[in-house]
Image (tube, grey):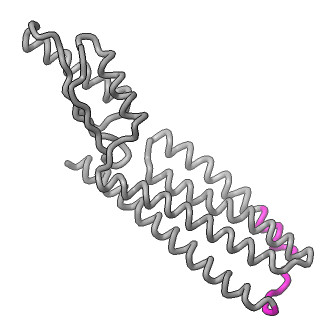
């Protein structure tokens, strides 16, 4: 139960982070749209802002790659969400570099167009994170590819003759599996139990399932 609660808490945190990204992207998009309606208010920027944007881009991209590596190593969706948050910052920095460069070249409206594009990207990333987290919280099943892989692992277990039923559902960033395996009808109960335990262990080890 403690593991279940902790994983649901991670999914809930990821959902909140996704909603925050969506709100941030929406606010930035609205602000850019409002400013684009008054082109006379646009101002030229200092050349130093371009070098600051380039430095920010490099640091954010480095942070994203490091965090994504750690997230996949730990199989943590929450940390991966934070990594993609850093990537959204890196992507926005890249667009900001283009916008500032255009502003310095005399196309001042390019700065706001870049801001609008950044806002749309942030909103999209937030939507993806929030959607996946919500799917985990409402106990959706694994996708067909993962289910097929689990089925193959069970059927490849020595002693398993067939599979009567296979159900899966997500629990945080891992899965719960319920399966009915068929064995030879004339073996002993202890032999059948041993085969079932072996099948269970293979799925837990191969597919990193929370429980089977």
Q: Position of residue 153 (x, y in %)?
A: 35, 22
Locate the C terminus by quadrant.
top left
* Side of 6 relative to 189 (left or right): right
Residue at position x 75%, y 68% from top? Answer: 96
Q: Position of residue 70 (x, y in %)?
A: 52, 44
Q: Name the dominant secondary structure of the magenta segment.
A: helix
Q: Judge by depth and name the residue closer to the eye, 32 or 69.
A: 32
Answer above or below: position of 83 versus 185.
below
State the residue lying farthest toward the top.
186
Per the image, is 45 magenta? yes
Answer above or below: position of 155 versus 137.
above
* Side of 85 relative to 167 (left or right): right
Residue at position x 45%, y 41% from top? Answer: 74
Residue at position x 50%, y 58% from top? Answer: 128
Answer above or below: position of 22 versus 200.
below
Q: In the figure, residue 138 lies in which quadrant?
A: bottom left
Residues rendered magenta in the picture? 40-54
State the residue lying farthest toward the right.
105
Q: Judge by depth and name the residue closer to the eye, 203 or 144.
A: 144
Residue at position x 51%, y 74% from top? Answer: 23
Per the image, is 155 magenta? no
Q: Position of residue 28 (x, y in %)?
A: 61, 77
Q: Position of residue 1 (x, y in %)?
A: 19, 48
Q: Judge by depth and name the residue closer to the eye, 80 or 128.
A: 128
């Amino acid at each position: 139960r403690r593991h279940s609660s902790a994983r649901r808490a991670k999914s809930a945190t990821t959902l909140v982070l996704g909603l925050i990204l969506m709100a941030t992207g929406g606010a930035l998009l609205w602000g850019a749209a409002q400013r684009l309606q008054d082109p006379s208010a646009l101002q030229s920027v200092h050349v130093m802002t371009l070098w600051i944007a380039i430095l920010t881009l490099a640091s954010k991209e480095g942070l994203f790659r490091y965090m994504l590596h750690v997230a996949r190593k730990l199989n943590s969706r929450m940390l991966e969400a934070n990594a993609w948050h850093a990537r959204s910052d890196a992507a926005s920095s890249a667009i900001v570099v283009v916008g500032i460069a255009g502003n310095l070249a005399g196309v001042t409206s390019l700065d706001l167009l870049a801001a609008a594009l950044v806002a749309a990207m942030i909103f999209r990333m937030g939507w993806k994170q929030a959607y996946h987290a919500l799917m985990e919280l409402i106990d959706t099943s694994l996708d067909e590819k993962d289910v097929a892989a689990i089925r193959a692992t069970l059927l490849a277990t020595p002693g398993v003759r067939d599979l009567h039923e296979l159900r899966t559902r997500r629990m945080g960033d891992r899965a719960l599996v319920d399966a009915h395996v068929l064995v030879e009808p004339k073996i002993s109960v202890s032999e059948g139990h041993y085969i079932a335990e072996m099948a269970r262990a293979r799925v837990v080890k191969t597919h990193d399932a929370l429980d089977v």
